Image (tube, rainbow, N blue to C red):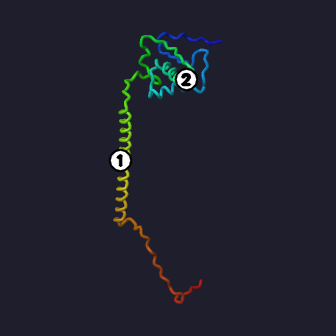
Amino acid sequence: MLRYKKVISNPDQQRIAVIYGTSDLHTANDSDTFTQELHRVYKDENGEIPILEIVRKVNQSWADRKIEQMCMADIRELGNNWNHFMWPTANTIKAKQENTSNQNECKENDEKAAMQKDIDELKKKMNDLLEKQSKIVMHSDADPLVPSRKRKQATLSRIPSKTRKTTKT
């Protein structure tokens, strides 16, 4: 027996979207799941997808790959309540940039410039460290309080055995 559930209010129903991975009474294949296909579409779209376009784009992606599976949605639409929502976030639709070959070149140039900046910063840090090290070495050589790095040779005197006095204990 199901326990009692409250009726979902109309304003709450307008905020619910259910997407089914397959149509009723149709089989689904574990090698081509809705989630996998949605991820493929997500990557092809370079990110977020308008919620109202998910079913159409996933079904088209399956059709393009000759997979006989269809998903479906149960969305309560009222006016344009879903027109500006994106998946996987709750963000509204962002303006899309034109996709040109110059964009890819600009992106690569930006990445190269960022890498060169990082390299230059590392070189500067390395030079600063080398300069500090040379100042430390120069300072220690000039400072009389710093022990010399040369090993002092011990002087030993040897007394000939004939002149040595023996002591009795």
Secondary element at tag 1: helix
Question: Mark 1 and mark 2 in contact (Cβ < 8 Å)?
Answer: no
| Residue occupying the point 38% across, 52% down | 126
Q: Residues within 10 Å of mark 1 (few under 14, many from 20)?
A: few
Where is residue 105 drawn, in percent x and y? Answer: 37, 36
Amino acid type indicated by mark 2: Lys
Q: Measuring 60% from the left and 17% from the top, which residue is drawn there?
A: 26
Residue 24 spot, x, y in % from top left: 59, 15
Tag 1 residue: 120
Looking at the rendered image, the disc whose residue lies closer to the viewer, 2 or 1, is 2
Nearest the eye: 146 or 163: 146
For the residue pair 49 and 141, the one nearer the viewer reads as 49
Amino acid type, residue under disc 1 in the picture? Asp
Image quadrant in which the C terminus is located? bottom right
Relative to 33, does residue 133 appear above or below in the rendering? below
Marks 2/1: CA–CA distance? 51 Å
